[in-house]
Amino acid sequence: MWSVVSYLSSSELVASFQRACGLFPAPRASHERLWPRSTKIHGRANGTSAPCPDGEHAANGHTSDVSSSGYEVRNWPLYFLFVGSTTLGNEVFYITFLPFIHWNLDPFLCRRLVNMWAVVMYIGQVMKEMLMIPRPSSPPVVKLEQRIEFGMPSTHAMAATAIAFTLLLSAPERVKFQFEFGLVAAVVLSSLVSLSRLYTGMHSALDVICGTLISAFVLGVSYPHWDSLDFFQLNSPLSPPITLFLPLILCYKYPELDHYSATRADTTIILGCSAGCSIGYWLNQRLGVTFEPSGPFPVTLPPITPAIFTLGAARFFVGLLILVLTRQVTKWIALRLLCLYYSVGVNDVSAHRRKEIEVPLKFSTYLAIGLVNSVVVCRVFTLVGLL
């Protein structure tokens, strides 16, 4: 048993998968000839530098071991497939896909997705900090991303599995569709995201398998209670205080490390957004306008005509603009109030990473985004004729 665990967690297995998919380290000789040792390279394919995660260009005057950071792509279709798939587990996908479901399909489905997304992501992030299992080593693995947090479990695999199968299990009671097609789509989506974490060199096979199994366990345990939780979330007077203060307490009680990690900030963002959406759904229920499609359920989805496509695209871009403005305004105000209270500079990045500033800043910003997404945006659509 231990030999199987050791094999699945090995960096060599990840490297073998990368080589089988056509991803190789750049030849050391040509790498050194093309790039001086004073150059920092975060990724290179066929002589072209890739952007650094923090937005800087590859050549910035820092030193790095170029032999472990350059790469050569020999199978471009697989490269684009897996690099594209890994974005389906990133925050940018969540903050666009989930609101899109709310604005253009059914707030009921969005509520289910947000709830499960928040639960599995919190479990996964906390497990990373508690287990402290490192990511695959480079070399032999080629790293396409630069992350400093731990590896076990893969939260990309967890989120992809949770979102795909929550949608699959929730949709039949709301819309008519071929379940077998949905099952295949859910399996393909979660598999692509999971395999992309091996391809990018960010997780071992064991990280991915454990992430998938944890999400499957959470879904299996919680599924029989989804209807009861929905009723409580929408109708109980205890719902707003619980969904506000419980996530906030969990953020403050997040495991402490001996170094700074962005995982606490990421987790606070997720829980803040989830809390805002939950309170917003409760408010919509009290106001008597939930913006859900009229029954009887399941409804038949209309064909996607040019008019429907244009209307959906208009909702998406207007709604996204409102959310971006909400984020910028709320963050600007909250940051200055917190810096004033704690007597630190607005531009002091190290101070912003302190828990007493980072947690309320991230939580309040994304709490506002969740509220605006669930309460305000659809009312704006009504005013401007998009609903």
Image (cartoon, grey):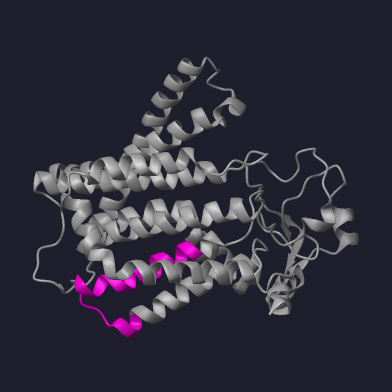
Magenta-span inclusion, residue 172:
yes
The front one of 59 and 200 is: 200
Label count reads 0
Task: Name which residue lies at 71% across and 78% down.
Answer: 20
From the image, which quarter does the N terminus lie in? bottom right
* Residue 139 seen in render: yes
Q: Position of residue 251 (x, y in %)?
A: 46, 41
> Which stretch did the figure color magenta?
158-181
Q: Position of residue 316 (x, y in %)?
A: 30, 52
Q: Position of residue 117 (x, y in %)?
A: 40, 58
Q: Residue furthest bottom?
A: 180
> How would you classify the magenta stretch by its main secondary structure?
helix
Q: Position of residue 261 (x, y in %)?
A: 61, 42
* Residue 106 seen in render: no
Q: Is residue 140 left or right of residue 159?
A: right
Q: Is residue 162 above or below residue 336?
A: below
Task: Name which residue lies at 37% across and 45% down.
Answer: 273
Task: Name which residue lies at 51% across and 41% down.
Answer: 265
Q: Is residue 358 above or below residue 383?
A: above
The front one of 129 and 376 is: 129
Q: Is residue 246 left or right of residue 50?
A: left
The front one of 299 and 137 is: 137
Magenta-span inclusion, residue 327:
no
Q: Is residue 93 left or right of residue 355?
A: left
Task: Name which residue lies at 88% across and 46% down.
Answer: 37
